[in-house]
Amino acid sequence: MRSSSLLKAVVSTLNRTCQRYQNTASQADLVLHTDPVLPIIDFSSFASKNEANNYSRDIIEKLANACEHVGFFYAIGHGVSNELLLRTLSITRQLFDLDSKIKNQYAARLFTNSSNRDQKYGGFGRGYQSLGENVTNTKRDRHEGFDLYRELEKNHPLRLQFDNTNLTDKNLPDYRDLAVGQNPWPKELPLFREILTEYTKAMLQAGERVMRGIALSLDLPMNYFETTFNDSFWVIRCIRYPSVESSESKSPEYGHGCGEHSDYGWLTFVNQDLDSRNCLHVRTSDTSKATYVSADPIVVEEQIALTCNIGDIVAFITNNKYRSTRHCVVSPVKPARSRISTPFFFEPNLDVKLRINETASECYYGEYLINKVRNNFNYHNDEPIDHAYIHIL
C-alpha cells in the first residue's frame, strides 16, 4: 500500500513559493447575481501526460489564483461531451420520477446495518435518500438523493483483504464497508447504470486533467498526483431539488435545498441543469456578513462548463493556500422546474495515506471517508429528526 507524503511535499514547495497575487478587491463587496463571475479555466492542454509539453503559464497562474482566492472555477476543455452530460441529467431525472415505493426499495437507510448488506446488493452509504432525510445545521435539506460509490472488483486486493477469514484481524484498515459495498442499481431503470458508468469513466479522465493543472499550479511535477488517483475511490451524488412556492422558501423545518457546507474530500465537479438559475450559491468571505455569488451553469464556445470546487483535503495539504469554499443550494422557485445535478467527487485511492488536520495522525483515505459517512447517518428513533442523513460541514 502506498504511503503518501502529500502534506510534507506540498507545504515544502509552498514555503519556497512567494504569493502570486494580491487580492485587490474585497470579496465582501460581491453581491448575488447570475453573471459568470467565477474564473473560467481551459484544461484542454492537460489532456496529455507528457511533461515535455510547453504549458501556458497564464493558464497555470489563472488556476492558482482561482484556487487561492475563490476555491471555485468553471472548467472547460475537460473532455466530457455535452451529449453525455445532458444524458446523465436526463436519466437522473427519470430515476427520481419513479414511484416512491420503487425508490425506497433502494434506500440507503436499509443498509446501515451489516446484517442487511451482502456482496451482491447494497452498501453502507449507498442508495436513495428521500426528501428531508439529509440534514444540515439541524434543518432538513429539501432534496432527494441517490449516492453511488466506487465498486471494487471481487479480485481487487483491497477487497480481498476483508474476506471472512480476516474479519478478526485488528491490523486491517477500518474501511471494510466501503471496500466490499455494492451500489443498489435500480433494476427498473437499467439505462441508469449504463449511463452513470459511462459518465464515471469520462469524469475520471476530467479529474486527471484538472489535477495535472493543479500540480503545476503548485510548482510540482505535472504527474505528481497520478499515483494518488490511479485507483480513485470516486463518489457520485444524484440529486433532485424540487421547486417551491416563494412562500415555502422559508420554513421552520426545512432549510435550503442543501445547507451551507464545504466539501470534505478532494475535488468536486458539478454537472447541473442548464436552466438552473440562482440555485448554487458560493460564499465570498468568511465573515459574519458573508455575501454570495450564484454559480449558474454556463456554455463557453458551445461547450458545457463543469463547475469545480476545491475540497477540505486540498485546503489542508496546501496549508490553506488553496481554499475550500462554503456553499449552499437554494431551492428553485416556481414556475421553475425541479433542479437536477450529478456532482462527481474525484477522490484518492482508498489506501492513500494522509493527514486531514494538524492534530490528527496519519490515516488511510478510506478511514477518513468512512468516518465521515458513519457520522452522516443518524437513524436512531430517539433523535429529534428520524431517518436523517446529517451533512457534516
Image (spheres, grey):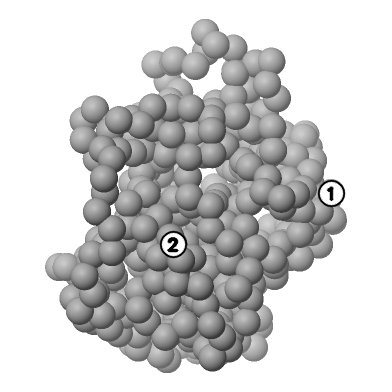
Q: Secondary structure at mark 1?
A: loop
- Label 2: few (<14), some (14–19) or many (≥20) C-alpha neighbours in 10 Å: many
Q: Which mark is residue 250?
A: none
Residue 351 seen in render: no
Write the residue at 40% across / 90% down: 2
Write the residue at 24% across / 54% down: 22
Q: Which mark is residue 63?
A: 2
Comes first in the chain, label 2 or label 1: 2
In this orientation, which residue lies closer to the viewer: 168 or 240?
240
- Residue 338's spot in the image, x, y percent? 67, 28
Q: Which mark is residue 188?
A: 1
Q: Describe residue 104's horizontal placement relative to residue 235 as left or right.
A: right
- Label 1: few (<14), some (14–19) or many (≥20) C-alpha neighbours in 10 Å: few
Give the alpha-carbon distance from disc 2 to disc 1, as whole Å: 42 Å
Residue 38 seen in render: yes
Q: Inspect the image, locate mark 2, and give the three-letter code of the amino acid beneath it.
A: Leu
